[in-house]
Image: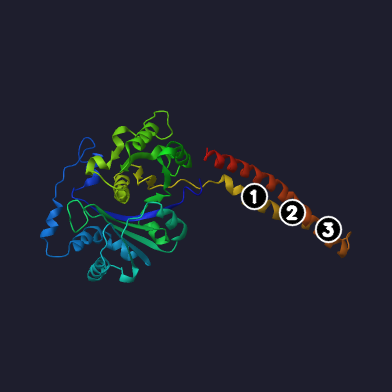
Amino acid sequence: QRWARKSIGLVDYCYLTEIDNLALKVMGLEGSQPMNPDKVMPISVIHEMISSPLFYVFEKIIMPMKAKINSLSKIKVLLNMTQSSDAAVMILANYCHSNHININESDIVLSDCIPSPEIIHEWIDTKYDESILMINLVYDVKNQLSFSEYCCALLFSNVKKALNLSKLRVFRPLKTELTDLSDDIGYLIKAEQVEKKRVNQLWTTSLSSSALNILKETFFDINGEIIIAPNKVYPLDLNLGKLSKSHAWLALALAADGVNQGQKGQMIAAQGSNEIYIMQLSDRTIQRIEENDELLIFPTVYFFSLVFCLYSIVALLAVNYVELKEILSIIVLSTFLSVIAVCIPLYFKLQCYQEEFDEIWFESFR
């Protein structure tokens, strides 16, 4: 649980689609029921613009984040595209320079693919003093458009200053496969990254019908640990048409809108070729588990307290009854006995933890 509950802050996010207020319309907050929103802005109008289409995209997804980007130092920019474009880095750097956004060309890393949510593990474990701005440009190859139709930018950070900018937290994602989904989703629920009663909505993208049915069976069960209402499950493929695994980050941005609109904890499920990733997002974190702290804290306190008491007794005896040589012998013997008194119970306690861990570990491979 301690490992699974680690998270990274989602400081800010922005997305561009051809549907105004997409998340609100999908959630039904602009209507009585969740709906398949109509496309209200033909995105092809960008072709008629004189400036670069990328400038238009950056204007929509980077400019709203300007204040928070500039408030953070040491930002690494991941510019991910589904089509290679050597000019994209220069265009982004020029745009940021002309608009006084604190991003330099040397901060930008270009990639011709969009990473899976598994990269969040790396950020949580290593990016303590660095912020990550992920920009995903998903090109519409079918219509041969020279820009992104469904793109997003997300700013992640665990630096201390970021904690004051946003309460949103993205937790470690679960990576699984269809054959293991039923069991693994149970482990995820028990980890309780988000308080169970606060998990309120599920967003899915490119999820197979089999995987979606497993999730529905799990969360529609009135006796289950987490219950999600049927009208709170949003398969984005029904809303936006056929999507790919690269749209998992767009789903995360939409889920963030859900949290900010008071819809509590959110869950996102996205499928690649074989892998299924499940992420959880919330503006609250579960309190640290205190039970395991006893393993290290209390034996240490107990040890030093015992040694102090023994030394005090020896010192009192030494005033009239014990010679210096005998005092040293008693101190050594007392220390040795104290170490044994602490180590033996600690050893057996560790053995119990090891047996429990081995049982869970081998059970996961059955």
Q: Which mark is residue 313?
A: none
At which x and y percent is residue 180? 44, 39
Q: Secondary structure at mark 2?
A: helix
Comparing labels 2 and 3, the label whose residue is closer to the camera: 2
x, y percent for residue 208: 33, 39
Judging depth in this view, the residue of 15 and 200 nearest the camera is 15
Question: In this rendering, does residue 159 appear at all?
Answer: yes
Q: CA distance from mark 3 to mark 1?
A: 25 Å
Q: Secondary structure at mark 1?
A: helix
Is residue 312 placed above or below 38 in the rendered structure?
Answer: below
Q: Amino acid at mark 1?
A: Phe
Q: Residues within 10 Å of mark 3 (few under 14, many from 20)?
A: some
Q: For mark 2, what is the residue?
A: 339
Amino acid beneath label 3: Ile
- Neighbours of disc 1 within 10 Å: few (<14), some (14-19), many (20+): few
Q: In this rendering, would 319 be left or right of 200?
A: right
Q: Where residue 87 appears, x then y in whole percent?
A: 24, 68
Q: Residues within 10 Å of mark 2 (few under 14, many from 20)?
A: some
Which of the two discs, 2 and 3, labels the residue nearer the N terminus?
Answer: 3
Label disc, if present, on residue 298 of the rendered structure:
1
Q: How is the image coloured?
A: rainbow
